[in-house]
Amino acid sequence: MEESINYLKTQFQLPDVDIRTYSPQVLAYIGDGIYELIIRTVLVGKGNCQANDLHRKASGYVKASAQAAMVLAIREELTEDEHHAYKRGRNARAFSMAKHATMGEYRQATGFEALMGYLYLTGQMTRLVDLVRMGMERTGGLP
């Protein structure tokens, strides 16, 4: 799984970039996408059902309040670098806010997404998946 980001970079001739130069919003942007892909993969892997049912289930996992609960559940397990990526995202200036979340939940969710983006862009997919699973187990959110 770790090879996937390197293969992608090779095929599209993407240069290696110092991850510290990315803004927390960019890390959260890519992290939101990779986290949703993981959730969708898990849900589809659990069995075939209608797409609107899959969407409804996925929405429960990717909403800001669920992401905030996930990061609170795994916070003690984060390495120093992971905690730094989370804090950068959490403390980033918000240009918008989720409709059904408090500002605190939204900021924690943005930090969680930045952490996911950091792990993905640094090729740490195993760690990313392990943290998502741990968070789901601790929040009772396993499908």
Image (cartoon, helix red, strand yellow):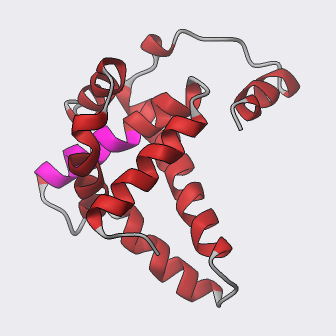
User: Residue 128 location, x and y as percent?
Assistant: 50, 40
Count of numbered labels shown in the rendering:
0
Which residue lies at the image location 75% right of the left edge and 35% below the top edge?
4
Say left or right for 15 vs 81. right
Q: Is residue 96 visible?
A: no
Which residue lies at the image location 42% right of the left edge and 70% below the top edge?
142
Which residue lies at the image location 43% right of the left edge and 12% below the top edge?
20
What is the quadrant of residue 17 in the picture?
A: top right
Query: Does residue 56 belong to the magenta stretch?
Result: no
Question: As drawn, which residue projects farthest toward the right?
Answer: 11
Say left or right for 72 vs 2. left
User: Residue 53 location, x and y as percent?
Assistant: 54, 88
Rendered position, 140 above or below 5: below
Q: Nearer the viewer, residue 135 or 49?
A: 135
What is the quadrant of residue 77 in the picture?
A: top left
Which residue lies at the image location 34% right of the left edge and 64% below the top edge?
63
Q: Main secondary structure of the magenta part?
A: helix
Rendered position, 109 above or below 57: above
Residue extent of the magenta highlight: 104-113
Q: Quadrant of the N terminus?
A: top right
User: Residue 69 location, x and y as percent?
Assistant: 23, 57
Rendered position, 128 above or below 140: above
Say left or right for 18 vs 6. left
What is the quadrant of residue 50 in the picture?
A: bottom right
Say left or right for 16 vs 82. right
